[in-house]
Amino acid sequence: MHGLTPILSTVTASFLASFVEVVEAFTIVLAVGVTRSWRPALTGAALALALLAALVLVFGPLLALVPITVLQFVVGVLLILFGMRWLRKAILRSVGVIALHDEEQAFSKETAALQRQAADRRADYLAAVASFKAVLLEGVEVVFIVIAVGAAHGQTLYAGLGALAAFVLVTLVGLAVHRPLARVPENALKFIVGLMLTSFGVFWTGEGLGAEWPGEDLALLAIFAVIAVASFAIVRWLRGAYPAPAEGVAR
C-alpha cells in the first residue's frame, strides 16, 4: 500500500494537470486548423512538441547530479508555489471573484483573430506561430509538472505516462467531436490539481529538510485532506464576502 500511494498520486496529479493544459492548447490548435488550415496548425504544434522534447532530453539527466535531499527541497518549494497559484485561482473562480475559463469563448476569440489576419500574406505563418505558442506555453507547464511530481521519488516515468495518457485522451476526444472541450469541469480539475501539487510540495519540502512523516508516503493523504479542508473553508468564507459571480473570460 505504501508503495502504491506515491505511484497512484503521481500518475493522478500528472494526468489531471496535463489534461487541463492540453485542453487549453488543443482549443487554440483546433481554432487554427478550422479557421485557417490544418497544415500550419499541426506544423506549429509539432515544432513546439519537438522543442519540449529537446528540453527534457537536455535538462532531464542533469537532475541525477543533484543530491536527493536538495532536489526534494527545491522541487517541494516550487510545487508549493505552483500549486498554490492554481489553488488560489480555482478558489477565486469558484466564488465568482474572477471569471471561469470558457473554452468556447477562447475558441471564438482565437478564431476571430485568425479571420482578421486572413488577408495577410503571412497568414499561414501567423497561424503556425499561434499554434506553436499555445502548445509551447502549456507544454512547458506540463513538463515542469511531470519533472516536479516525478523526480523527487524517482517516478518520472509514471508522471510521464500520466501526462501522455492525458495528451492522447484529449486529442482523440477533441478530434472526434471536432470542437473545443467546453464541458470539461476545468475549474474543478484545477482545484484538485492545486490541492495535489501543494500537498506534494509540503511533503517533499519536509523530506528535504529531513522530516520523518508519520505513516511515510501515506502522510500525503493526510496532508491533502488538511489542505482540502482549509481550502473549502476559505471558499465558504469568501462566498459570504463575494456573493455575486463575475462574468467574462478568465485571463
Image (cartoon, rainbow, N blue to C red):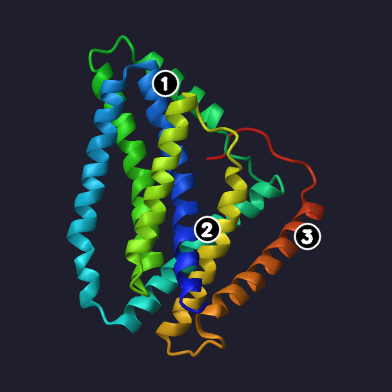
Query: For the residue carrying disc 3, how many other residues have a C-alpha within 10 Å: few (<14), some (14-19), or many (20+)?
Result: few
**Relative to 204, is 35 above or below?**
above
Q: Quadrant of residue 161?
A: bottom left
Residue name at image x 37 percent, y 62 percent: 158
Q: Amino acid at mark 3?
A: Trp
Q: Earlier in the sequence, mark 2 or mark 3?
A: 2
According to the image, label 1 marks what residue?
Answer: 113
Q: Is residue 141 visible?
A: no
Q: Please provide percent x and percent y for residue 247.
A: 67, 34
According to the image, label 3 marks what residue?
Answer: 237
Q: Please provide percent x and percent y for residue 133.
A: 32, 37
Q: Earlier in the sequence, mark 1 or mark 2?
A: 2
Callout 2: SS? helix
| Number of marks | 3
Residue name at image x 62 percent, y 76 percent: 222
Q: Earlier in the sequence, mark 1 or mark 3?
A: 1
Q: Amino acid at mark 1?
A: Ala
Q: Nearer the viewer, residue 18 or 89?
A: 18
Query: For the residue carrying disc 1, how many other residues have a C-alpha within 10 Å: few (<14), some (14-19), or many (20+)?
Result: some
Residue name at image x 46 percent, y 53 percent: 15
Measure how far apart labels 1 and 2 are at the Cα level: 29 Å
According to the image, label 2 marks what residue?
Answer: 85
Q: Is residue 94 left or right of residue 139?
A: right
**Relative to 232, is 42 above or below?**
above
Q: Is residue 205 left or right of residue 224?
A: left
Q: Nearer the viewer, residue 50 or 15?
A: 15
Q: Please provide percent x and percent y for residue 58.
A: 17, 59
Measure how far apart labels 2 and 3 are at the Cα level: 19 Å
Q: Quadrant of residue 182?
A: top right
Q: Amino acid at mark 2?
A: Arg
